[in-house]
Amino acid sequence: MNYTSIYKFLAFWWLIIFTNGILAQSVTLKADRDKILIGEQINLLLKADHIKGITQWINLPDSINHIEVVKRSEIDTLNLGGNQIYQQTITITSFDSGHWQIPELSVVDANNQVYMTAPVEVDVIPVDVSQMQDYHDIKEILEVEESSPYFILIIIAIITLASLAIVYWLMRKKKRVILSPPKITENLSPIEWARTELDKLQQENLADNMQIKQHYQQLTNIARRFFYLELGHQSLHQTSDEWMISLQPLPINMEVKTSFLQLLRLADTVKFAKYLPPAYENEQSVKTARQMIELTADWHRAVIFSPNKKS
């Protein structure tokens, strides 16, 4: 008898059996414990061994059979000697005492072969709080006598209305600008006076926040006084909104007029909201006011000296 051939034959079959055992395809779901108190957590380890081309992973709902899923880890992939292993950790808990079961879960591979896990049994034990010193039983509901809330509601309404009235009065007082009519010397016309003042304003160096605020204050004051002297507008006694409304009918370039109205809004923001514009807007502000004043003066002179003007 050739013992060498027999040994080779047995070794061959032993290798096949052993290899098949190692490469056996399986899906398992194991819990780190099977008994918990209410609210405690269990970690489930889901493992798929040597299953290639998984097309459908297990579907465990967030809540099933009195069991809640707390979190799920990412699906990890391991390669051990050519053996592909997928695993995921799922943390669960339960807030209902009793004996609960996680049913069979399935994994499907590329050949539509289904691999099932075994059910997992969980016992949830209630917490005994009867021996705790801070434990107090639930007391009976106590009825509370109803009291009329009308008096309190009336006081709240009065305080609210008074607060709104004070805020409105302060806003009106803050926005309303009252200027005294300017005294113009050397027989300057309104446009000449405005040009002179704008030239002085353009030469100022705006080094700090206070100078920027004063810059816009002086700029609007020059514009208000010019329109008062040139057109007889009530600009010295109007709020910014009232003044802008009175400027709307002027038949001058719409783009220039819109830029000037935006300048007035910007000036209010600087004065009252403490907004600090960028440097290029400060430089452009004088140019915008000058364009508006120049066009208004040109239009007004054309109207006054028009040959069709009625005497």
Image (cartoon, rainbow, N blue to C red):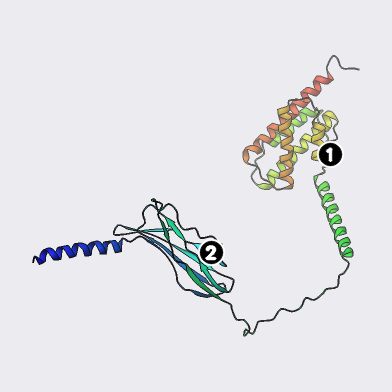
* Quadrant of the frame with the C terminus: top right
The earlier-in-sequence mark between 1 and 2 is: 2
Q: Residues within 10 Å of mark 1 (few under 14, many from 20)?
A: some
What kind of element bears circle 1?
Answer: loop
Q: In the rendered image, which quarter is residue 15 located in?
A: bottom left
Q: Which residue is mark 1?
A: 238
Q: Is residue 69 left or right of residue 247?
A: left
Q: Which residue is mark 2?
A: 69
Disc 1/disc 2 C-alpha distance (Å): 68 Å
Query: Is residue 184 visible to the viewer in this orientation of the structure?
Result: no
Q: Is residue 181 left or right of residue 55?
A: right
Disc 1 versus disc 2: nearer the observer:
2
Q: Is residue 47 left or right of residue 144?
A: left
Q: Is residue 159 above or below residue 235?
A: below
Q: In the rendered image, which quarter is residue 156 located in?
A: bottom right
Q: Amino acid at mark 1?
A: Gln
* Quadrant of the frame with the N terminus: bottom left
Q: Amino acid at mark 2?
A: Val
Query: Is residue 80 visible to the viewer in this orientation of the structure?
Result: yes
Q: Is residue 119 left or right of residue 289?
A: left
Nearer to us in this view, 266 or 216: 266
Q: Residue at coordinates 83% horizontally, 31% vertically from top-left?
A: 229
| Residue 85 image label | none
Residue at the top extreme, as displayed = 307
Residue at the right extreme, as displayed = 311
Q: Residues within 10 Å of mark 2 (few under 14, many from 20)?
A: some
Nearer to us in this view, 261 or 158: 158
- Where residue 132 sits in the image (x, y, percent)? 62, 84
What kind of element bears circle 2?
Answer: strand
- Where residue 276 sits in the image (x, y, percent)? 66, 45
